[in-house]
Image (cartoon, helix red, strand yellow):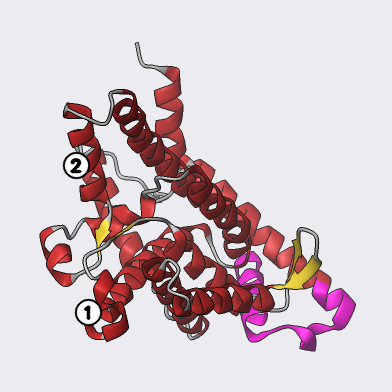
């Protein structure tokens, strides 16, 4: 008999919205690593469990050198889902939730995970390049790096680039425009690099920020940088679903689950409602080019 908890997790990973999927993967990896760290600690940090803990850490963290990356290329992905500290994962995931919701509301659910991955990949590569060529950073060459921050920063900057004047309610401060939130995040990372505080992490954040900006600039030009990654996911999903082909022909086949389809439609309608509300308050000319395109496409679908 299948375990209902396991089955529920599988369902969330398969059919949940992308924010849920990213949070679940990060939490599951954190719990997996933490279990071995706790057992290692209780065993006096000796013996087999310490070796297993070291093996897990050494094969999930990104080694910040090209030599390390060549021998462990998978770490360019695994590092952005790995955390050792509870507060580290908490702040990364709460920020992912806040900005991920905004990003999806104004784009689509299928763009979030590719942006997160691209932000993490670019952040990691830029950090390795700078550690290799910039003398002040070469003493850190080969150090391990973990955390979702580069991917999350990509989402923050992408959201602020797309809707810079939308307000976000900040604790103890009140409403602040997203563009100022993003600029503050970037400013803090630059200051932290200059003070040699978590140099690798802060450089990766700046790389993620650059990726988020480029992603939206290209999106506004009609270029979807998430397309290749989504095609890969579709291909991968098809491998696991492969089975005997039915002889029955169907006129239409939806490529997404009912939950994803309904979620996307709900988010699309919310975006359209916000645009119509803006027209009623400030007129059609107050709309941005992106908002006009969204409205035009929606009217075409309904006609």
Q: Looking at the image, which is closer to me, 177 or 21?
A: 177
- Local packing at callout 1 (Cα closer than 10 Å; few below 14, some 14-19, many 20+) is some
Residue 175 visible in rendering? yes
Q: Quadrant of residue 147?
A: bottom left
Please tell me how many numbered marks the rendered image carries: 2
Q: Position of residue 30 (x, y in %)?
A: 40, 40
The chief SS type of the magenta part is helix
State the mark number for residue 132.
1
- Compared with residue 110, is residue 25 higher up or lower down, i.e. above or below? above
Q: Position of residue 223 (x, y in %)?
A: 42, 80
Q: Looking at the image, which is closer to me, 134 or 291?
A: 134
Q: Which residues are magenta?
A: 278-303
Q: Position of residue 27 (x, y in %)?
A: 44, 40
Residue, x 49% and y 48% (percent of image)? 89
Residue, x 82% and y 77% (percent of image)? 279
Does residue 299 appear to the left or right of 188 in the view shown? right
Residue 191 included in the magenta stretch of the image: no
Assign the C terminus to one quadrant of the image.
Answer: bottom right
Does residue 82 appear to the left or right of 270 in the view shown? left
Residue 247 visible in rendering? no
Assign the N terminus to one quadrant of the image.
Answer: top left
Q: Earlier in the sequence, mark 2 or mark 1?
A: 2
**Label 1's element?**
helix
- Local packing at callout 2 (Cα closer than 10 Å; few below 14, some 14-19, many 20+) is few
Does residue 80 appear to the left or right of 90 in the view shown? left
Q: Can you name the residue that lies furthest to the front here?
A: 44
Q: Position of residue 167 (x, y in %)?
A: 75, 70
State the mark number for residue 55.
2
**Label 2's element?**
helix
Residues at marks 2 and 1, CA–CA distance in whole angstroms: 25 Å
């Amino acid at each position: 008999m299948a375990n209902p908890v396991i089955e529920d997790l599988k369902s969330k990973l398969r059919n949940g919205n992308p924010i849920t999927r990213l949070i679940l993967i990060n939490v599951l990896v954190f719990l997996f690593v933490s279990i071995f760290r706790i057992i290692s600690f209780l065993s006096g940090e000796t013996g087999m469990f310490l070796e297993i803990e070291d093996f897990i850490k050494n094969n999930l963290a990104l080694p910040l050198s090209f030599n390390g990356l060549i021998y462990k290329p998978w770490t360019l992905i695994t590092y952005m889902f790995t955390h050792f500290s509870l507060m580290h994962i908490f702040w990364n995931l709460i920020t992912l939730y806040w900005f991920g919701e905004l990003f999806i509301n104004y784009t689509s659910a299928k763009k979030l995970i590719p942006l997160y991955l691209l932000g993490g990949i670019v952040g990691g590569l830029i950090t390795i390049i700078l550690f290799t060529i910039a003398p002040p950073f070469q003493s850190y060459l080969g150090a391990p790096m973990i955390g979702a921050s580069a991917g999350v920063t990509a989402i923050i900057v992408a959201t602020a680039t797309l809707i810079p004047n939308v307000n976000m309610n900040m604790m103890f401060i009140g409403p602040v425009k997203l563009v100022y939130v993003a600029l503050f995040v970037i400013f803090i990372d630059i200051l932290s690099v200059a003070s040699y505080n978590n140099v690798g992490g802060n450089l990766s954040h700046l790389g993620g920020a650059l990726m988020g900006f480029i992603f939206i600039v290209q999106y506004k030009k009609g270029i979807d940088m998430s397309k290749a990654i989504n095609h890969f996911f579709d291909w991968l999903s098809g491998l696991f679903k492969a089975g005997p082909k039915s002889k029955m022909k169907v006129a239409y086949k939806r490529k997404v689950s009912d939950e994803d389809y309904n979620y996307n439609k709900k988010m699309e309608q919310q975006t359209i409602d916000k645009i119509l509300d803006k027209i009623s308050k400030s007129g059609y000319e107050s709309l941005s080019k992106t908002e006009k395109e969204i409205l035009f496409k929606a009217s075409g679908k309904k006609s």
